[in-house]
Image: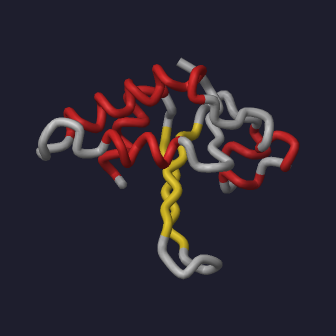
Amino acid sequence: MALIGDALLEVTGAYRINYTIAGNTDPYLHAHIIPRYLSEPDQYLKGLPWSYPKEVMGTTLFDYERDRELIQQLAKAIQKRCDRPHGCLSDCLAWNLTAPGYFFEGGL
C-alpha cells in the first residue's frame, strides 16, 4: 500500500495519503488509498476522507477517457518502484481505479 501511496504523492501532488483496510461489511479485506490535498476545505482537511457530504463525494466519479492519463502516470510511477516484471501492477491498478465510487479530487 505504501508503494501505491508514494506513487500517488508523486503523480497527484497530494500533501499526504490516507490508508484504510477494512473488512467489516464484506467477507474479505479491502483497502482505500486516498490522496489528500491542502486545497481541501478546513472542515474536512483533517477528517476522514468520507466525511465529505454525499453530494460532494458523488460529483467526480471515474471516467476512463478523462482519467486515462492519470492511470498511465500511476502505473508508470508504481512500476518504477516495483521490482517485478514490466506490467506487474498495471492490470490491478486499472481495475481498482474503475471500481464504482472512485473519487479523485485535485487534478494534474
- Count every numbered label the image shows and give the total: 0
Q: Where does the N terminus fall, quadrant-wise?
A: bottom left
Could you say where residue 92 lies in the image, as x and y percent from the top left? Answer: 37, 48
Residue at 35%, 36% in the rendered image = 7
Of residues 41 and 62, the one drawn nearer to the viewer in this rendering: 62
Q: Residue at position x 29%, y 38% from top?
A: 78
Compare residues 88 and 37 and report the one nearer the observer: 88
Give the residue at x 54% y 72%.
22
Q: According to the image, what is the colour scheme of the structure?
A: secondary structure
Q: Quadrant of residue 65?
A: top right
Tell whether 70 sits left or right of 52: left
Residue 28 screen position, x and y as percent = 49, 77
Residue at point 67%, 56% (across, down): 48
Residue 84 on image: x %, y %: 13, 46
Residue 43 percent coordinates (x, y): 79, 44
Question: Relative to the observer, which residue lies in front, 106 or 98?
Answer: 98
In the image, taking residue 62 as reference, residue 5 lies left or right, namely left
